Each structure stands twice: as structure tokens, then as C-alpha cells.
Amino acid sequence: MTRADVCVAACADLFAEDGEVLASPMGLIPSLGARLARLTSAPELLLSDGEATLLGPDGEPEGWLPFRQVFDVVAHGRRHVVMGANQVDRYGNQNISCIGPHERPTRQLLGVRGAPGNTANHRTSYWVPRHSRRVLVEAVDVVAGVGHDRARAAGLRYHDVYRVVTNLAVFDFATPDGSMRLRSVHPGVELDEVLGQTSFPLVTEGAGTTREPSAAELELLRTRLDPDGRREKEVPS
Ligand code: F8G
């Protein structure tokens, strides 16, 4: 079992209670997580190719969901997106837009893309493949995805920033003020490493160890979902 396997299982667990919603995972490990969930804990999960086709867990076509209808699903709320984050702060504000001052960025990134609408309408989680102080920041340079503090101030009714999975640990926001809480540290990672690689203080009470994938999950990953081991490139052991 590798760290990448643990990260895939943690991403699968994001969808475990979702029921019949559209999963929109960004990046390889969240995508493997969604497919693994579909085969195990979340048989009703809908998987998409990100363009126009709904897929089964092995990539076989299952249905038709043209891009314009994705906007209806986004607005209706029956979707769980797992976005990336160049920066994320303690309230789950996320930045994929640019680094540095907005007027004169030092790095232009993707732009805010669908992040504002996603975080106003349905459940959102984040995947961070390289947990570091420059990603887990005190304050994001640009707000793309809306965090709990801003959602509260704006009175957003359907805001649901749920969890953050990184290569080191899993976090949620189950605190009175919606700030980030450590849920679990991945096997083989020290708590001090997580704290040292995070720029803001974390609530750590009650944190455990991230579960190891079961033998059946590992078998699915190794033989069916990712036999070439591409996940090891996204999270090297
Ligand atoms: C940094 C930092 C940092 C990066 N601090 N520097 C530097 C300092 C780094 C590099 C350079 C590049 C609904 C929907 C939509 C839609 C519709 C439908 C969405 C509305 C579809 C289309 C649309 C949004 C989906 C994501 C993003 C996924 C990732 C990334 C990454 C790495 C975040 C992990 N902190 N960071 N730099 N999109 N992407 O030194 O400098 O910047 O760095 O949902 O769109 O429009 O809306 O990012 O960056 O979720 O997860 O891969 O860009 O690859 O290469 O690390 O080395 O070049 O000098 P990256 P990286 P240099 S939903």
C-alpha cells in the first residue's frame, strides 16, 4: 500500500454519503477516488468525462450530459466537485486564479473558472497533491472558491465546502466558526509535518489516522482502475 493508495481511498470517502449526484473530480487521484467510490460505497454516483458523456467506472459510456446541462446541475445542487487549489486558507477560500496582487500578478494561473458558482450552489471539496505552506496559506491572494467566513457574511444558503484531502492528511470544517479542522493524518505522516507545512493554526482535537484502503479496494486499483500506477506520479511515495 502506498501513500497514493491512501489518498485515492480518502477521495473515495468524499463521495460515500452523496447518493445520486454528479461527481466532478479534477485531477487523477480524485478521479480514481470517484470511480472507486462508485464501485464500493457510492453505487449511485454519476461519473462524467467532463465533456458530454456520463461514464461507468471503467470508462464505458452510460449517458448523455452535454456541457450546457452541466450548468443546470451546478445550479440545482446535485453535484460534488473536487477542485484543485494553488492556495487554500483556514476557512476554505481557494485560489486558482493568480499569485500576487491582482493588478500585477507574479504568476497567472487558470483564472477563477467555475469556482465561484460551484461554491455557491453545491458541495465542494479540494485536492492538494503537494501540501505546503505556500498552498495552505494564511490568506489567499484571490478568492476563486468561496470559504465559510465569506459565505456566512454573504448569506449563501447552499454553500457546502466539505473537506480538503492532501498528500499528508484530511481536513474538514466542522468547527463553530467553520475553520479548518484536522480529521486524520495519513499513515506514515507525523502530525508535526502537517502542522509545519500549514501556515495557519489547525484544530487538531479528535484527529485520527486516515484509514488504509481495504484489500478489495487495492485489488480494484491495481488491476482495474489504475493498473499502470499513474497515481504514483501524482503522489510519489
Ligand atoms: C505558485 C503557487 C503558490 C503555483 N504560490 N507560486 C507558481 C506561489 C508555480 C509555477 C506556476 C504554475 C463547472 C466547473 C467548471 C467550469 C464550468 C462548469 C470549472 C463552469 C468548467 C470550465 C470552467 C475548476 C476546475 C480546477 C483546477 C485543477 C489543479 C492544478 C494545481 C496546480 C492547482 C494542483 N501557491 N502555485 N505557483 N479547475 N488544477 O511556482 O511557477 O505558478 O504552478 O466546475 O472550471 O471554466 O468552469 O496548479 O500550477 O479545479 O489542481 O493542477 O496551475 O498546475 O504548475 O504548480 O514554476 O512556472 O515559474 P498549476 P503549478 P513556474 S471548476
Image (cartoon, helix red, strand yellow):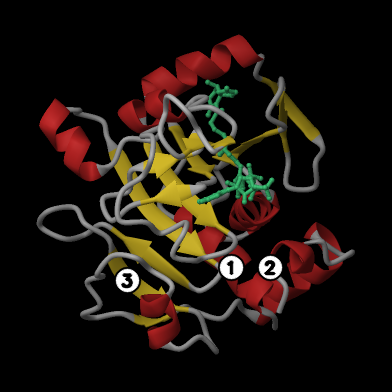
Amino acid type at mark 3: Leu
For marks 2 and 1, the one nearer the N-term is 1
Residue 33's x, y, as percent? 62, 56
Amino acid type at mark 2: Val
Instruction: Please report the residue visible at 16 percent of the width from the left and 60 percent of the height from the top.
Output: 175
Residue 7 badge? 1
State the SS at label 3.
strand
Q: Is mark 3 within 8 Å of ligand 1?
A: no
In the image shown, does 186 or 66 lie closer to the viewer? 186
State the SS at label 2.
loop
Distance from Cα at disc 3 to Cα at disc 2: 20 Å
State the SS at label 1.
helix
In the image shown, does 20 or 164 lie closer to the viewer? 164
Instruction: Please report the residue visible at 39 percent of the width from the left and 18 percent of the height from the top.
Output: 75
For marks 3 and 2, the one nearer the N-term is 3
Instruction: Please report the residue visible at 10 percent of the width from the left and 57 percent of the height from the top.
Output: 176
Q: Is mark 1 within 8 Å of ligand 1?
A: no
Location of residue 36 by image quarter: bottom right
Residue 205's x, y, as percent? 21, 80
Position of residue 24 in the picture relative to residue 146 (left or right): right
Residue 40 sits above or below residue 116 on the image: below
Q: Quadrant of the C terminus?
A: bottom right
Residue for badge 3: 182
Residue 235 badge? 2
Mark 1: few, some, or many residues within 10 Å (few <14, many ≥20)? Answer: many
Q: Hey, which residue is sitting farthest right in the picture?
A: 228
